[in-house]
Image (tube, rainbow, N blue to C red):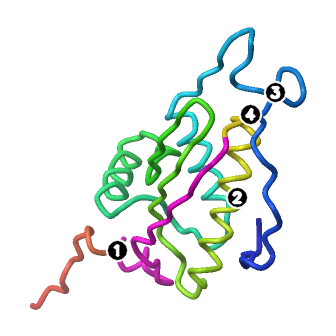
Amino acid sequence: MSDIQTASQTASVPRARTESGAPGTSLVTERGTTSIDDGVVAKIAGLAAREVAGVYDMGAGAARAFGSVRGMVGGERSPAQGVSVEVGERQAAVDLELVAEYGTAIPDLAAAVRKNVINAVERMCGLEVTEVNIRVDDVHLPGQERQQGGEGEQQQEPRVQ
């Protein structure tokens, strides 16, 4: 998604496939129940949120720092970083913590993230998303990596003879 969509541009979101419509599309049927783990929904929501232009990173300060350290030692960042979910039999609620790019209109960003997360979770999991709460934890400033990258390095002072 390259452009942020405003709330007025968001069309109605298709409902989850939990009603007894087409056979095999419901999570709860007469032949059995399908349950989806919280971690699965959290990964889907995290990946969907990161797809939106204007989202720089996910998670609060401590989670981002831990993720950076994990990345330095060869581990991968979790797609569920900055995401918490509550999943029931037919519904899910999602809480997101994100870092916005400087210059991005936060209300438009939140609307675009919310729409993308709802679409992804409802389409892939068949759960009705009751709410997506978004907490913008920080704003990423241009050139911030270059400034931070030099802090840990030791610079040699010129020798005086």
Residue 84 in the image: x percent, y percent?
A: 44, 47
Question: Eyeballing the image, is 89 above or below 47?
Answer: above
Residue 128 in the image: x percent, y percent?
A: 67, 44
Question: Image check: 147 left or right of 18?
Answer: left
Judge the density around disc 3: few (<14), some (14-19), many (≥20) Cα neighbours within 10 Å.
some
The mark closer to the camera, 3 or 1, is 3
Secondary structure under the numbered disc 3 in the rendered image: loop
Question: Image check: 42 left or right of 52?
Answer: left
Q: Earlier in the sequence, mark 4 or mark 2?
A: 4
Residue located farthest toward the top when viewing the structure as drawn: 31
The quarter of the image holding the N terminus is: bottom right
Q: What residue type is labelled 1?
A: Gln
Q: Distance between the residues labelled 4 and 3?
A: 7 Å
Q: Which of marks 3 and 1 is nearer the N terminus?
A: 3
The mark closer to the camera, 1 or 4, is 4
Q: Distance between the residues labelled 4 and 2?
A: 19 Å
> Which is more toward the observer, 29 or 100?
29
For mark 3, what is the residue? 25
Q: Which range is magenta? A: 128-149
For mark 1, what is the residue? 148
The quarter of the image holding the C terminus is: bottom left
For mark 2, what is the residue? 116
The mark closer to the camera, 4 or 2, is 4
Q: Earlier in the sequence, mark 4 or mark 3?
A: 4
